[in-house]
Amino acid sequence: MSSPRLLIKRPLGSGSFGDVYEVDRNGQSFALKVLKSGGVPCIELKEVKLLVSLRHTNIVKVQTIGSFKKIGATYYELCPKGVGNFGILLELCDTDLRKKLEAQVSGVNHQWSLIIVNQLLDGLIFLHQNGVIHRYEYK
């Protein structure tokens, strides 16, 4: 990481484990997920370690993991282990599949559907070939 200081551009979301921001590092945008204090849940740590090891076109790329400390209201800084909160600097995705589908006012055309399904299956096959089984629980 060439510059440890990350400019906070805007919040992207918040959940029970932490907050996600769009940040700028040397003119390039990333997503920064910063976990709330209180430690890293074991399941979260396993997912991060797994994500770091996987490289595929259809899987978000991890840039850096480590401790991040908020500097004022506008910056986060990568710092020595234990000083800040655990965080993950990720490739920034401009949208998600749900938003793409909802944006299709006139319905989803056949060609676009085939492209999306092909990308999903390509990523899923890669995960399964690497011993990953994904499940999602809806509440």
Image: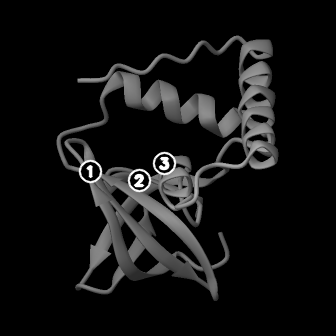
Quarter of the figure with the N terminus? bottom right
Q: Nearer the viewer, mark 2 or mark 3?
A: 3
Front-most of residues 139 and 63:
139
Element type at mark 1: strand
- Classify mark 2: residues with Cα within 10 Å, few (<14), some (14-19) or many (20+): many
Rendered residue at 25%/42% (across/down)? 17
Q: Earlier in the sequence, mark 2 or mark 3?
A: 2
Front-most of residues 21 and 137:
137
Q: How many marks?
A: 3
Which residue matches tag 1?
18
Residue 98: image tag = 3
Q: Earlier in the sequence, mark 2 or mark 1?
A: 1
Element type at mark 3: helix
**Image height check: is 38 above or below 21?**
above
Residue 87: image tag = 2
Q: Amino acid at mark 2?
A: Gly
Front-most of residues 23 and 101:
101
Report the side of 43 relative to 50 (left or right). Answer: left
Residue 104 visible (yes or no): yes
Element type at mark 2: strand
Where is residue 103? Give x, y as percent. Answer: 51, 62
Q: Amino acid at mark 3?
A: Arg
Where is residue 68? Give x, y as percent. Answer: 38, 62
Residue extending furthest toward the front: 106
Residue 84 visible (yes or no): no
Q: Earlier in the sequence, mark 3 or mark 1?
A: 1
Q: CA distance from mark 2 to mark 3?
A: 25 Å
**Image height check: is 5 above or below 112?**
below
Rendered residue at 30%/29% (across/down)? 41
Q: Amino acid at mark 1?
A: Gly
